Amino acid sequence: MTSSALDTLLTRIVESGVIDEPVAENGLVYGRASIDAAGTVVKVNVDPEFDGDHDDEIDQEALIAAISRILSVSESRWRAVVDEVATEIDDAVDDEPVVEQIDLRDDLEATSVVVFADAVLLAFLSPKQFPDARILVQLDEDLQVDGIEVREDLLDHA
């Protein structure tokens, strides 16, 4: 990707005001922002997914829209995502011992968001039930859960 394409994307994100103090480097634009429905501030990474062929053709509006969509998610949609994540994980670990008995819905803490034009990847920590893991949740364009992964790699959480 050319640095001018990334700089143009950065300028557009700065103008939109969706991310606080955005920075562009290593093919990404990143900064911090609040997901009000979650009541938390998260790290936001915007990945324009350059393939090297037409890297100056960034759909800036699609990326800005995707950022805005996840940051302004309604409380009911956020609760539905958290509920689906907790239910799927609870079903998957059904009889496995957990560190602490607490409703996973109350333990999930959103820490970061990676935004693509057509998807969002949320990272959660669950310090009581899964203290050594991250929970990664992929959402589609409509913020519907598209995949869930519990990754045992707390050392490098996003």
Image (cartoon, rainbow, N blue to C red):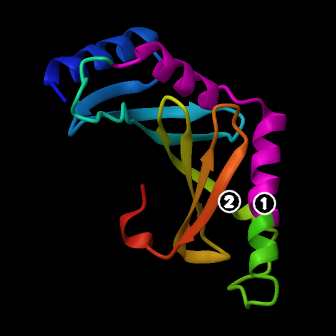
Helix, strand or loop at mark 1: helix
- Is residue 130 placed above or below 56 in the rendered structure? below
**Frontmost residue, 118 versus 6:** 118
**Frontmost residue, 4 versus 30:** 4
Please give the name of the residue rendered at 68% of the width and 59% of the height, measured from the top-left corner: 108
Left or right: 3 in relation to 153: left
Q: Which residues are magenta?
A: 58-87
- Pointer 2 and pointer 1: residues touching (CB < 8 Å)? yes
Q: Tell me residue 47's x, y (percent).
A: 38, 36
- Is residue 34 placed above or below 88 in the rendered structure? above
Left or right: 143 in relation to 105: left
Q: How many labels were placed on the picture?
A: 2
Screen quadrant of the C terminus: bottom left
- Is residue 2 placed above or below 76 in the rendered structure? above
Q: Quadrant of residue 44?
A: top left
Tag of residue 84: none
Screen quadrant of the N terminus: top left
47 falls in the magenta region = no
- Tag 1: Cα neighbours inside 10 Å, few (<14), some, or many (≥20)? some
Please give the name of the residue rendered at 33% of the width and 27% of the height, measured from the top-left corner: 22
Q: Which residue is mark 2?
A: 108
Q: Quadrant of residue 89?
A: bottom right
Mark 2–mark 1 distance (CA, rounded to whole Å)? 6 Å
Q: Quadrant of residue 54?
A: top left
Please give the name of the residue rendered at 47% of the width and 34% of the height, measured from the top-left corner: 116
Q: Amino acid at mark 1?
A: Arg
Q: Tell me residue 33's x, y (percent).
A: 50, 32
**Frontmost residue, 138 versus 131:** 138
Tag of residue 105: 1
Left or right: 101 in relation to 141: right
